[in-house]
Amino acid sequence: MKKLFAVLVLAASALTVTAQNRQTKNLIIVTLDGMRWQEVFRGADSGLVNSKYTSDKDDVRKKYWAATATARREMLFPFLWNVVAKKGQLYGNRDLGNKDELANQYRFSYPGYNEIFTGFPDVRMNTNDPIVNPNMNVLEFINKQKGFEGKVIAFSSWERFPQILNVGRSGLPVYSGYAELKNADANPRLKYLNELQHSTPKYIGDSTRSDFITYEFSKEYIKQYKPRVLYMAFDETDDMAHEGNYKDYLARAKQEDGFIMNLWNMVQADPFYKDKTTLLITCDHGRGESDGWRNHGADVKGAEQTWFAVIGPDTPPTGEVKTATVTYHKQLAQTIAQLFGFDFKKSAGHEVGSAISTVTVAK
């Protein structure tokens, strides 16, 4: 089923940066699988709300419809637009000429996640099958840096991330699908989640778990273990779209915005994380329009159109980017590394896109 210049300066390779320049000490990355830029920047799509893809249209209009795109998007993504848009940056509003895109030609999940984390749109990564990714990823790279060893972790709903992040080589703890957390000292809540995930309805398949469980694992792990880098990967937006269920696609998008809000509020209340943590939110691919909204892939026009948002102590609060520029997902890996003052490109052993500068270099 798979599945941050005019304001700033793009090529961050021109910058000389060190870890001491950075206020970011921790990072949370969140992906919403297959979440279209159209809903992120326009809110609910009238054509789809009034189509065969939406059941209970009156209820959907009540929850998500308003006269302007600005109002609609705030109804759908209140955290993104009331917090990130005021204190961070959002990229990908094509209505303003600002484009964020995939560099890979395949436009589905495994190639999309490979591009995000390796910075390399590798033509070999052209399947959603459980092949082991030969490319070094930025989470693996960070996990090898002093002070980060054993402090990088991933929780995902989709079961494919152990292969995407190559746990056999990287040694990263990646808890995907219905994998149980094995830490002997895990708190009672984490142990309960190991059991609970097997009891929740498997309405998105026998291998992909509920986004709620992925969120709860991430939240409880942060509380107990204080990781420096956490990746939380949601899946249900893509699942609902593939099913042609626009009502639930919107509902899952709003729910995940709420999960991210709760997590951000929690870390901002924790002295370990408060004002020292960057949050990056994005997707793995786009989707088509009109009747093509259910799908994505190489032959689906618009599936290369993506978006991302970032908020944190090194990100100037410029809000929605309104310049006619293009960024690519292959730039995110080096961007992530440079938030800590690291250079992933020198160590990756393969092509890596140049960073998108989201930092203010200390004088």
Image: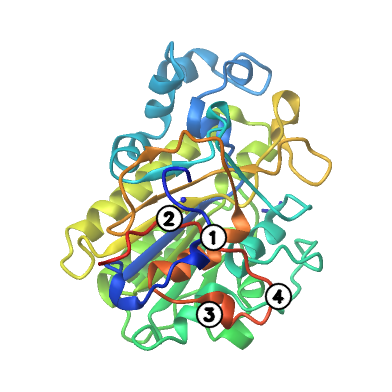
Instruction: Please report whichever mark, 4 or 3, sits nearer to the chain's N-terminal start.
Output: 4
At label 2, the amino acid type is: Leu
Q: Residue tagged by mark 4?
A: 133
The correct choice, above or below, for 152 with respect to 55 in the image is below
Q: Residues within 10 Å of mark 1 (few under 14, many from 20)?
A: many
Distance between mark 1 and mark 3 Cα atoms = 15 Å
Residue 164 visible to the viewer: yes
Residue indicated by mark 3: 140
Secondary structure under badge 3? Answer: helix
Type of amino acid at the residue the image marks with label 1: Leu
Q: Are marks 2 and 4 in contact (CB under 8 Å)?
A: no
Q: Which residue is mark 2?
A: 280
Element type at mark 1? helix
Instruction: Give the alpha-carbon distance from disc 4 to disc 3, as whole Å.
Output: 12 Å
**Which residue in the protein does label 1 denote?**
332
Kind of element beneath mark 4: loop
Q: Earlier in the sequence, mark 2 or mark 3?
A: 3
| Res 326 quadrant in image | top right
Q: Amino acid at mark 3?
A: Glu
Q: Secondary structure at mark 2?
A: strand
Report how far apart the C-alphas of labels 4 and 1 lie in the structure: 18 Å
Question: Residue 289: percent from the left, percent from the top?
Answer: 70, 28
Q: Residues within 10 Å of mark 2 (few under 14, many from 20)?
A: many
Q: Residues within 10 Å of mark 3 (few under 14, many from 20)?
A: many
Residue 213 x, y percent position in the rendering: 44, 58
